Image (cartoon, rainbow, N blue to C red):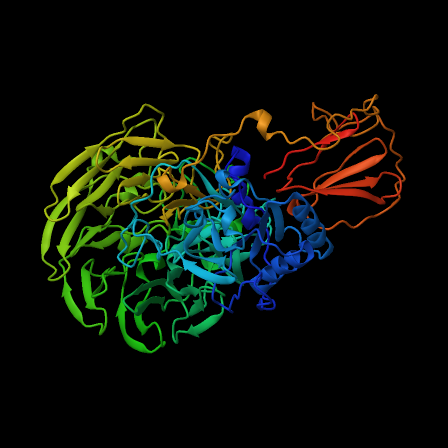
Amino acid sequence: MIPASVRSFAARILLSLLAACALGGPGRAVTASGQEEPPIAEGATRAGLTVWVGGDAAPPQWARQLTNLHNHDGRLVLGLHADDETVARAREELARRGAYGQVSVDRLPAKAAGLPLIAESVNLLVVAAPAEVAAGEIDRVLTPLGKAMVREDGAWRTITKPWPEDIGQWTHYLGDAANNPVARDRRIAPPRHLQFQTGPRWSRHHDHMSSASALVSAEGRVFGIFDEGRYESPQLPPDWNLVARDAFNGALLWKRPIEQWQCHLWPLKSGPASLPRRLVADGDAVYVTQGIQSPVTALDAATGRTLREYEGTTGTEEIVYSNGVLLALVNRTSQIDFDEVDPAKFPPGEDGAVSEGASPDDRVTWSPPMDRRWAAVRSPQWAHSERVILAFDAASGEKLWSKEAGVFPLTLATDGRRAYYCDSKTRQLTALGLKDGRQRWASGPLPVWEGVHRQGLHAWFAPTLLVDDGVVVFAGGEKMHLAYRGWGREDQGEDTMTAFSAETGEKLWTADHPYSGYNSPQDLMAAQGKVWVGCTAKGGGNPGFFAGHDLRTGAQRDHYPPTLDTFWFHHRCYRAKASENYILSSRTGIEFVDLKTGEWTIHHWVRGACLYGIMPANGLVYAPPHPCACYSEALLKGLVALAPPTASRELPELLSAEARLERGPAYDAIAEADADEADWPTYRADMGRSGAAPSAVPLDLRPQWSTTLGGQLTPPVAAGGRVFVAATDRHTIHALDAHSGEPLWRFTAGGRVDSPPTYDRGRLLFGCAD
């Protein structure tokens, strides 16, 4: 698939379309055959996007080389060449081979214009004509850890781009094993443009289970658990998959199906909050439960191949990895049987199946089974299941130790030396040695909602525990139930947060913890030597604030109310995240709060997935698919990666409209007559998109002809005795005889043609993302 040109807005976002194509499986390795073909060893380079620049091979041979690169491991391949005839002939050869789309060819601009590629988007750059590539372009377009193979004096030289020091990874749901949702990333900033955009395009339903359960990133790859089922109705079956993509261009690397996951009809914004904790990435390994009741499995990050399974981990709800040790939090209690839950035990308005003052009929998807699921949202099992912490040597799978414990969901964390958690029975913080599991210390009882023992927790809520720089900070949400029962929060005082020494367990301080989170755990972040909390969950236009407390003393150092005037919704249904320089609030969309100046920058057009939220990593901000409709005219859809306006990503000025119009050879050959009134010359018939034509259509329809073109086809248009249709994934316009279906001609463009062409007086007009 052709990557984006940086010379127009439409072309700049073309990388968003890269990942929409399914990649082929493994094929034969490329072998060296003369100086033109680089010697690429098996596994020596990353799959994703490969770009080949120039060379003196004949077009058929060049097309074969490009196809071989794709067949090597299913990577996307783009060839760039300065000679128009070579481009045209190579396109024809690739189309003849049936490879066009996964492998594509475009014109190489003049050297001064630079390569037509988004910064840090290419995994392998083959430069067969180095004289045609400007200085600095190789480093600009390579992804971190990407490779360039440059032909010099008949030999190939390999260059590897190192991992930049200013970008961070995101290996766990809350950033890392310490539960601190702060990316160690100095590049992230308010976004300037799309790095890529891919699917799933939508979350399946607003009132039910989020279609994005987890998202993590390590060493230039992104891994997610998504429901890719059809979204016409929430009643249709789910299609859960573990999906691996390149972190910088979105290209699909591999996919593994998940046979059974959490019920997709789980109620509105109700979690379970521990689902994102079932996926962890570190280096070349991915740790995951490949089903709701499956054991923990280690997978190869590059291929998805199974490496090992960890014994006794069936029923794992959370995974934590640090310093070579894998922790699995296993629920020994049987999973909730929704059909056995009695809604009568949870009366409406208290812990019930529907909101206070509402009836079951207020929900279009209500049914008796759904009522039982609503009741199960507040089951004591979420807090009081019998759980055990199992510790393994991650590399070998050897079991190191185990600990029976009533662990509150989401509170298990480690700093690489000790593991910490809050006990749901004693309400104490406990510290264990990471290597041996022996108890190091336990705190006194902590404030946790007093009704938790009687009624349990909402499935979407959990206390918050993080570790940073030798300090453990805990917030129990002791008054959170008041918000659920009618927003009666303002007169009840604040929750609290408490800090302890990670070394000794000594209590350091206690401070107010303002009300944040909306059907989600509350915010708690540590950055720049401070603990950051927000008052962001109140609706009705309440502006709220973020406050920074000294990590060692708890004293408030910063108070940042919004610096702009806008209407403030209640908090989104997921936690805020942060980078080293910004809080990424989830108030209305994404709000960037500068940690030094307190300035707020709003981006209402960016939303995260319910429960999970967004992911800051790799110098980018990733937003998974969501079901939202607010600001729908500008709201981004699908899995998107947003890039900041850093020096390495600065874009040239847009081309003028005149420069963007490419005139084909028939541009001035305008026919005398316009289309017949019975024709269908444009999408939905006319400029009014009426979808109607005066032609008489008989009721007794029979097939007249059928033609196989291949690819993903747009709706057709018809005029002048011809039918015209675009193959979007093959960058091609087809012309067929309207009476016989016989192919008359085809034209391959320089990029994706994602909508039907328009017929006008004997010529075709269409847009293209080159």
User: Number of marks in the image?
Assistant: 0
Tell me where residue 532 appears, x and y as whole percent. Answer: 22, 42
Tell me where residue 106 appears, x and y as whole percent. Answer: 61, 45
Q: Residue at x 18, y 47 (%)?
A: 497
Tell me where residue 653 appears, x and y as whole percent. Answer: 46, 30
Left or right, residue 418 beside residue 78 = left
Q: Quadrant of the C terminus?
A: top right
Q: Residue at x 53, y 66 (%)?
A: 39
Is residue 681 shown above or below 610?
above
Q: Residue at x 45, y 61 (%)?
A: 157
Left or right, residue 216 beside residue 739 = left
Left or right, residue 513 beside residue 29 = left
Q: Is residue 536 visible?
A: no
Tell me where residue 2 appears, x and y as whole percent. Answer: 58, 46
Specify the farthest residue to the front: 153
Residue closer to the observer: 434 or 454: 434
Residue closer to the observer: 148 or 236: 148
Residue closer to the observer: 698 or 675: 675
Q: Is residue 34 visible?
A: yes
Q: Quadrant of residue 392?
A: bottom left
Residue closer to the observer: 653 or 55: 55
Q: Residue at x 20, y 37 (%)?
A: 547
Is residue 424 shown above or below 519?
below
Q: Quadrant of residue 58?
A: bottom right
